Amino acid sequence: ESWQPAGISEAQIKAAQAIATKVTDALGGAGIFGVEFFITKDEVIFSELSPRPHDTGMVTLISQNLNEFELHLRAILGLPIPHIETFAPSASAVILADRHSKNIIFNHVAKALATPDVDIRLFGKLTSRPYRRMGVALAKGKDVTDARNKAFKAAKTVNLSESPNL
């Protein structure tokens, strides 16, 4: 799950940016890095890094003028990155598989999309295993809590079953 705005203090943002810069500069490479943290009242703790666009960054597909994929390409190609504008409080929630299957179909996608300001992105994976990330639900809301609730509900609405025809 991820959301924008983050709802953390300016000091926490600066601490996270400093840690992310230190880690990514040490690694080198091109493009964007998904850098995740645990944030407590008193600490910003590095969690993990993905040297590529990541599903936790997919919230940017609905939340801002340049999404993580556009930013990745611009960074790799050395193209300018103009001011990034956010549109509305937004959130993403992962659609997880609950089974092993070689012939997955997605159910209730239309029902999830019936909620205003909700979008579903499926990753095109035909096989699954429990807890495999199969897609994300994206939502805008009046505030972060509303967006998170919409995204979570949409992600839980979509479920998987095995196709009898494949």
Image (cartoon, helix red, strand yellow):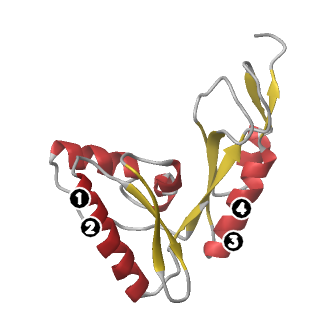
- Percent coordinates x, y for residue 123 in the rendering: 57, 34
Spatial distance from mark 2 to mark 1, Cα to Cα? 6 Å
Q: Kindly identify which residue carries mark 1.
A: 26
Query: Does residue 42 appear to the left or right of 104 in the view shown?
Result: left
Q: Amino acid at mark 3?
A: Asp
Local crowd at mark 4 within 10 Å, few (<14), some, or many (≥20)? many
Q: Are marks 2 and 1 in contact (CB under 8 Å)?
A: yes
- The residue mark sitting in front, 4 or 1, is 1
Please identify, in this view, whether the residue under mark 3 or under mark 1 is nearer the observer. 1
Q: Secondary structure at mark 3?
A: helix
Q: Is residue 51 above or below residue 5?
A: above
Residue that carries the numbered disc 4 in the rendered image: 150
CB-based contact (under 8 Å), mark 3 and mark 2: no
Please report whichever mark, 4 or 1, sits nearer to the chain's N-terminal start.
1
Identify the residue position indicated by label 2 in the image: 22
**First in sequence: mark 2 or mark 4?**
2
Q: Is residue 163 visible?
A: yes
Q: Callout 2 environment at 10 Å: few (<14), some (14 to 19), or many (20+)?
A: few
Front one among 18 and 93? 18
Q: Where does residue 19 sit, x and y in percent of width and height?
A: 33, 71
Q: Is residue 47 left or right of residue 128?
A: left
State the quadrant of the C terminus: top right
Q: Residue, x 68% and y 58% (percent of image)? A: 151
According to the picture, the residue beneath numbered tag 3 turns out to be 146
Packing grade of label 3 (10 A; few <14, some 14-19, many >=20) is: some
Residue 89 position, x and y percent, is 55, 71
Front of the two marks 3 and 2: 2
Q: Is residue 50 left or right of residue 74?
A: right
Give the residue type that dot 2 points to: Lys
The amino acid marked with disc number 4 is Lys
SS assignment at label 1: helix
Give me the C-alpha separation between circle 2 and circle 4. 35 Å
